[in-house]
Image: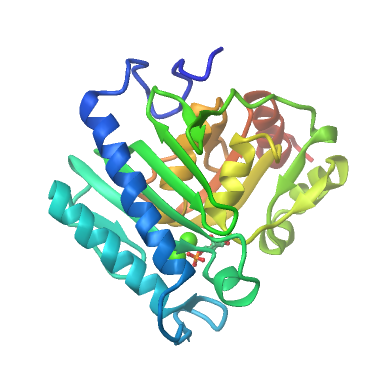
């Protein structure tokens, strides 16, 4: 299978990207890079505060990046934007931008690496265009539905399937505590890792740096863009139980190449032990 053939669970038609999607991708990359530049140097104190709990952080930079990207995209396209830091939508009908201005804010504040700008364009809730920028590594991952995925402009190949024993699983303590079966899968795997940015973790499966990614609760902005990048690299992206992902709703996300994905769903959900 080539990197440009359809292979997603969003029902890709496999046609060449529509001309307007190619233009919109250029716009999305430009605007996301502008956001990344603001994150690198917000030009003022970060003024870190908390949201839902003491480790759910938000900074001035999160808000500045969202305001900038939302204003630019609104002026250029007029499509509504759903953003983590305050932009809401009335409906998923038609085209909607979905933005996480900084995915991995805790990293942004504490470790200063492994954070991303994540931007997707959805049509009726299905991502058709994606940009994920690993800001510190200066890597720009993009995808257009049915048109393959790229990293800094270079096509990404279909990710190799692999045996669990050779697969790194990206997941967190919360998941391991909640799912004893997952702990057993990790024991049988190459090991587990956690970067702290769901978008970058999911993309790591697309690039073959990890075999699987599992998270129990993500929001649309965490994963909309990365899910399309994954599916364009032949990765299956579903809920924990294998149900196709409907990005309009928060919930679990399991991403892995098809054979490993089947094995994980079987061991996590189906097998009677
Ligand atoms: C968070 C990161 C983290 C994930 C959390 C997300 P944020 O996003 O993606 O890896 O475990 O569930 O909320 O708050 O840094 O944008
Ligand atoms: Ca996020
Ligand atoms: Ca965020």
Q: Residue at x 46, y 48 (%)?
A: 132
Count all numbered tags in the image, as a single digit.
0
Q: Residue at x 37, y 28 (%)?
A: 145
Point out residue 174 in the picture as x, y percentages from the top left corner: 67, 63
Please say if 27 is above or below 52. Answer: above
Q: Nearer the viewer, residue 245 or 108?
A: 108
Q: Residue at x 55, y 25 (%)?
A: 234
Q: Nearer the viewer, residue 11 or 229?
A: 229
Point out residue 95 in the picture as x, y percentages from the top left corner: 21, 41
**Could one spot residue 182 in this view of the protein?**
yes
Q: Is residue 94 left or right of residue 168?
A: left
Q: Is residue 273 left or right of residue 101?
A: right
Please say if 141 is above or below 39. Answer: above
Quadrant of the drawing holding the N terminus? top right
Ligand 3 location (quadrant): bottom left
**Could one spot residue 101 in this view of the protein?**
no
Quadrant of the drawing holding the C terminus? top right
Q: Is residue 82 left or right of residue 253?
A: left
**How is the rendered protein coloured?**
rainbow
Please say if 115 is above or below 273. Answer: below
Q: Residue at x 77, y 42 (%)?
A: 168
| The furthest residue to the top | 1
Point out residue 11 in the picture as x, y percentages from the top left corner: 37, 23
Q: Quadrant of residue 54?
A: bottom right
Q: Quadrant of residue 219?
A: bottom left
Point out residue 246 in the picture as x, y percentages from the top left corner: 39, 41
């Amino acid at each position: 299978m080539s990197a440009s053939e359809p292979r997603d669970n969003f029902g890709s038609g496999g046609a060449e990207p529509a001309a307007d999607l190619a233009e919109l991708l250029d716009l999305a990359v430009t605007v996301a890079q502008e956001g990344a530049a603001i994150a690198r140097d917000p030009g003022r104190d970060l003024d870190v505060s908390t949201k839902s709990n003491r480790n759910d952080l938000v900074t001035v930079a999160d808000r500045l990046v969202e305001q900038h990207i939302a204003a630019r995209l609104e002026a250029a396209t007029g499509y509504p934007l759903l953003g983590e830091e305050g932009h809401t939508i009335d409906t998923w009908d038609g085209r909607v931008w979905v933005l996480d201005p900084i995915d991995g804010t805790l990293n942004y504040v504490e470790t200063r690496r492994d954070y991303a700008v994540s931007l997707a364009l959805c049509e009726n809730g299905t991502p058709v265009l994606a940009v994920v920028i690993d800001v510190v590594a200066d890597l720009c991952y993009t995808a257009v539905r049915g048109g393959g995925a790229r990293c800094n402009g270079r096509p990404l190949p279909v990710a190799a399937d692999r045996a669990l024993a050779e697969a790194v699983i990206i997941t967190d303590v919360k998941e391991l505590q909640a799912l004893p079966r997952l702990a057993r899968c990790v024991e049988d795997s190459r090991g587990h890792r956690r970067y702290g940015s769901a978008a970058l973790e999911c993309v790591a499966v697309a690039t073959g740096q990890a075999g699987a990614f599992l998270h129990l609760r993500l929001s649309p902005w965490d994963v909309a863009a990365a899910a399309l990048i994954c599916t364009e690299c032949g990765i299956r992206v579903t809920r924990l139980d294998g149900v196709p992902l409907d990005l309009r709703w928060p919930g679990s996300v399991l991403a892995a190449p098809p054979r490993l994905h089947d094995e994980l769903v079987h061991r996590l959900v189906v097998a009677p032990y």
